[in-house]
Amino acid sequence: MQLNILTLPGDGIGIEVTREAVRVLHRVCDKYKHTASLSEALLGGIAIHKTGGPFPAETEKRALEADATLMGAVGLPEFDNWPPEKRPERGLLGIRKSLGVFANLRPVRSYPALLDSSPLKNHLIDGVDLIIVRELNSGIYYGTPRGIEGEGKSARGFNTMSYTWDEIDRVTRMSFELARKRRKKLTSVDKSNVLETSQLWRCVVVEVAKDYPDVELDHLLVDNAAMQLVLNPKRFDVMVMENMFGDIISDEGAVLAGSIGMLPSASIGGKRPSGAWVGLYEPVHGSAPDIAGQNKANPLGAIGSVAAMLEYSFGLTEEAAAVNKAMETVLNSGRVTADLRPKGTPATTEEVGKAVCEAI
Ligand code: NAD
């Protein structure tokens, strides 16, 4: 198979972890006789430095042409005080919007070798295997009007949370489809006791559920969902929620796995003429300025994102499983980065990437 992939390493550790993810991708292609055609473009802080903006038109064009896009992370401390519309992170919103990816999938799995790295007691985390589906293309991060009016102590900041029926319908359907291929359980998270957008959300979910009678559905208010995720994470299979709730809850999910560096994500949307999903794949973590450039970052979130890409964008389930299995082998071997608190000397980013390749 010919895989046309655009890489956007971005800033900080994004560059380091993407390098290892690409190494693993080449290894998979060698082993399974696929041809990877990879090209690289600019996004985030590096794009601001080189082109004046976080999401150059050239990057947009090439992402729209690629079969799939593999992203690192964006964000540089020097832009921390810039207005939101000029910051590197605006590049993320830009590419998600322009690719039309409307669902962000964040799998959270416990690995036996990492049980002690989780802040939860072993018996709570052992066996956790869930996916958080976050609506990605609407809600309060995109709604207008938005802004800050007035000045000083009379200033008022405001944002708008809005959802249409169709926006809820499509992400709900995708979540039911995912649940159907897993343990057939979907939890919809909302705040329908307070928010009108959540009341519509629940109404649409109930309507879509009629097409999936084989999937068990339940609803949780977001505050309770946050609590249940640490009290009894094994109760969840697939969870679906709107953009901002998903942003927050998925970071809570991140710590369950032991380190934010472990978590992959897939942002997928409408189907291409070939039937494949439009896909944007990235680790959940940011650019981690505190460890950037030190060869210390855990690349497994980025490598797991390659596995997700192979599965969702190319339908290569055997290859995806090989990557996941190799990651598990490396975790069991104890050759892991400092964030996973290994017993001996921590491995470097590059050593972990090479170890995954060897295990494949
Ligand atoms: P962060 O995820 O970059 O880092 C949080 C903490 O986790 C840090 O201590 C960091 O060292 C650690 N960490 C993160 N990834 C790791 C990895 N792979 N291996 C080992 N340790 C890891 O979040 P932050 O510090 O809040 O944000 C830093 C910058 O990244 C900001 O500019 C922020 O806006 C940006 N950001 C970008 C994305 C993205 O590109 N998708 C996501 C979140 C934050």
Image (cartoon, rainbow, N blue to C red):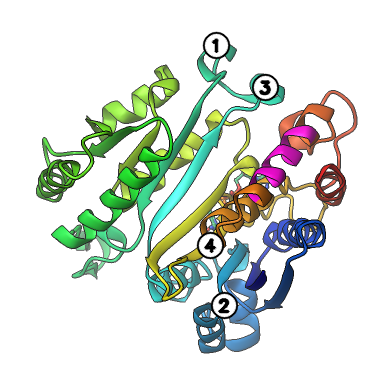
* Tags 2 and 3 touching, CB below 8 Å: no
Neighbour tally class for label 1: few under 14, some 14-19, many 20 plus, Cα within 10 Å? few
Residue picked out by circle 2? 66
Q: Pointer 3: what residue?
A: 112
In the image, which is nearer the foreground, mark 3 or mark 4? 4
Which SS type dominates the magenta stretch?
Answer: helix
Residue at mark 4:
313
Specify the quadrant of the image occupied by residue 8. Answer: bottom right
262 displayed left or right of 98: right
Q: Secondary structure at mark 2?
A: loop
The tag earlier along the polypeptide, 2 or 4, is: 2
Q: Quadrant of the N terminus?
A: bottom right
Give the SS element for disc 1.
helix
Q: Quadrant of residue 66?
A: bottom right
Say few, some or many: other residues with alpha carbon within 10 Å of mark 4 (under 14 / 14 to 19 / 20 or more): many
Name the residue that disc number 1 marks: 123
Q: Are marks 2 and 1 in contact (CB under 8 Å)?
A: no
Which labelled disc corresponds to residue 4? Answer: none
Q: Nearer the viewer, mark 2 or mark 4?
A: 4
Q: Is residue 280 above or below residue 179?
A: below
The yes-or-no answer for disc 4 within 8 Å of ligand 1 is: no
Residue sitting at the far right: 345
User: Viewer-nearest of labels 2 and 1?
Assistant: 2
User: Mark 2 and mark 3: span between their CA atoms?
Assistant: 36 Å
- Judge from the rendering whether residue 187 lies leftward or rightward of residue 345; answer left or right: left
Q: Are there few (<14), some (14-19), or many (20+) residues within 10 Å of tag 2?
A: some
Q: Are marks 2 and 4 in contact (CB under 8 Å)?
A: no
- Residues shaded magenta: 320-329
Rounded to the nearest angstrom, the CA distance separating label 2 from label 4 is: 11 Å
What is the spatial separation of the Cα atoms under label 3 and label 4, in whole angstroms? Answer: 28 Å
> Could you tell me the amino acid type at mark 4?
Ser
